Structures are given as C-alpha cells and as structure tokens.
Image (cartoon, grey):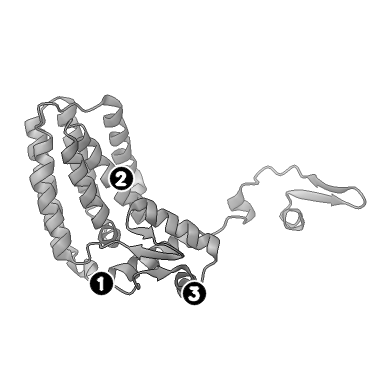
C-alpha cells in the first residue's frame, strides 16, 4: 500500500485509510512496477550448461537451486517449461534427468538433411490439404516478423515460430508419420537453434521464403511448393556454415 501511495496510485488520509487516486497514466511500466523475468535467464543458463555437458545426470533440485541461486518457485517454473519442451524429466525423488540433445554443428546439419528428405515429400502426399485458417495464422506470423519482430522477439519465440510453420505445412499432408518425424527432430535441435539466434540477419529471407511456400500451397501448386521448400532448407544448411563459430561457442 505504501509503495502504491509513493507511486501516486493511492492517497492516504489519516484515520480513514487509502483511496485510489485519479492517475491518468498508471501502467506498470510508467510506474516502475514491472519485474524482470529472471526465469528466462536461468532457463538459458541451464540450456547452455546442458549443451556443454556441465550438468550432472541426474541433477538434484538442491544442486540446481544452489548452482543458479534461485528459489524453489523459480526452479519449478523453469523445470516445468523444460519438461514441457521435452528435454528433461523428473526422476524418483527430487532429481531431474536431461535428455540427449544436439550439441555440435555437424549434428544440427544432419537433422536438416533428414528434413530435406522428408518435408518436401510431405507436400506431395495425395491426401495433402492445408486448412485456410492455418495458412492465415502462418502468414500473419511471418508478416509480424517482417514488420520488426525479427529484432525484438526472444530466441525461444523465433524458434517456436519456425517450428509452428514447418509442422503446420507438414501436418497438412494427412500422413502422421511425416509430422511425428519432424517433431522428434525439432525437439532435439531446440538448444542449438536458440544459440543460432545471435545472428538474425538471415531471418528476413527465411520469412519471405515461408510466404512464397504458403502462396504456392494455397493455390494448390504443391510440386512448386515442394521445390521451394527444398531450396529453403538448402539455404538454411548453407547458412549453418556461416554461423558455425556461433554454434561452436
């Protein structure tokens, strides 16, 4: 109450208590009441330590709290996110095991080569049908990035946008085995993908290529879309060579 009064949100009258003031611009930002998302920082520290093989297996919650200097509530939030993403699971008691992930540029390139074999083929399935609403959502996401979000979105948000686009167009194949294979690959490449977000200048081209693929799919020109997707993945593989020093950090 005293903090809100100091910020001008409340006024205090002796023997009567606190009353809401007539504050015209009382957003959390202007009042200085926003808090920093420390859990995001801890999440990426754990991710980097996992990539470098610095985490014991299993890792106890006591170890994690002491290593990262956080409270139980913060740790639960971070581990809950990691478990949901599929790269850690709770062990009996208070321990956690972290799943094997891609840790080298070579392994990341191998996943793209598997995707190169799978994804263009999925667009040629006889049961292919891209839902209009799905296409609209994908297009809006790409246009938002081109409108400036490439520079402002978090690494996790950029990664998820790419995952959603590719899983959406592959999921429209009507063949669940294509989608399951792509999902398995996306789970294990997540952490190296985050690291690659340090260099974002290639994202404009990726967005434009995504929009081209959508245009072709919406016009049911799937053979051309398949070829465009192949070129898109080949460009990404080429970009991996340029950002190799970042991935090896």
For marks 1 and 2 on the same chain, the one whose residue lies earlier in the sequence? 2
Query: Residue at (20%, 47%) from the top-left corner?
Result: 205
Residue 78 in percent (x, y) is at: 45, 59
Residue 61 in percent (x, y) is at: 46, 68
**Label ID, residue 96:** none
Marks 1/3: CA distance?
25 Å
Residue 229 in percent (x, y) is at: 12, 41
Query: Residue at (22%, 66%) from the top-left corner?
Result: 103
Task: Reply above or below: 87 against 57.
Answer: above
Q: Is residue 31 left or right of residue 120?
A: right
Query: Residue at (25%, 63%) from the top-left corner?
Result: 100
**Label ID, residue 249:** 1
For marks 2 and 3 on the same chain, the one whose residue lies earlier in the sequence? 3
Mark 2 or mark 3: which is in front?
3
Asked whether the viewer can see residue 212, the reply is no
Residue situated in front as seen by the camera: 88 or 237: 88
Q: How many marks?
A: 3
**Label ID, residue 161:** 2
Q: Is residue 18 left or right of residue 242?
A: right
The residue carrying mark 3 is 66
Marks 1/2: CA distance?
24 Å
Mark 1 or mark 3: which is in front?
3
Number of other residues with Cα within 10 Å of mark 2, as a class: few under 14, some 14 to 19, many 20 or more: some
CB of mark 2 within 8 Å of CB of mark 3? no
Q: Quick one: quadrant of the N terminus?
A: bottom right
Query: Residue at (41%, 54%) from the top-left corner?
Result: 81
Element under disc 1:
loop
Residue 147 in percent (x, y) is at: 34, 43
Asked whether the viewer can see residue 236, the reply is yes
Number of other residues with Cα within 10 Å of mark 3, as a class: few under 14, some 14 to 19, many 20 or more: few
């Amino acid at each position: 109450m005293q903090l809100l009064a100091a910020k001008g949100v409340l006024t205090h009258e002796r023997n009567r208590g606190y009353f809401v003031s007539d504050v015209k611009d009382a957003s959390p930002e202007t009042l200085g009441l926003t808090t920093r998302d420390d859990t995001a920082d801890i999440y990426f520290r754990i991710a980097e330590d996992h990539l470098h093989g610095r985490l014991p297996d299993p890792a106890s919650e006591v170890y994690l709290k002491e290593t990262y200097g956080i409270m139980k509530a913060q740790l639960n939030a971070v581990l809950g996110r990691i478990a949901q993403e599929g790269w850690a699971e709770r062990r009996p008691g208070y321990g956690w095991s972290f799943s094997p992930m891609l840790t080298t540029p070579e392994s990341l390139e191998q996943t793209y080569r598997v995707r190169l074999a799978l994804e263009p083929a999925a667009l040629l399935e006889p049961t292919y049908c891209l839902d209009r609403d799905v296409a609209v959502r994908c297009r809006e996401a790409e246009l938002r990035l081109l409108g400036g979000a490439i520079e402002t979105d978090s690494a996790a948000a950029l990664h998820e946008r790419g995952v959603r686009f590719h899983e959406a167009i592959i999921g429209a194949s009507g063949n669940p085995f294509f989608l399951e294979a792509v999902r398995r690959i996306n789970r294990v490449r997540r952490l190296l993908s985050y690291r690659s977000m340090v260099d974002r200048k290639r994202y404009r081209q990726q967005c434009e290529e995504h929009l081209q693929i959508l245009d072709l799919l919406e016009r049911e020109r799937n053979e051309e879309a398949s070829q465009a997707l192949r070129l898109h993945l080949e460009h990404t593989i080429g970009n991996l060579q340029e950002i190799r020093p970042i991935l090896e950090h």
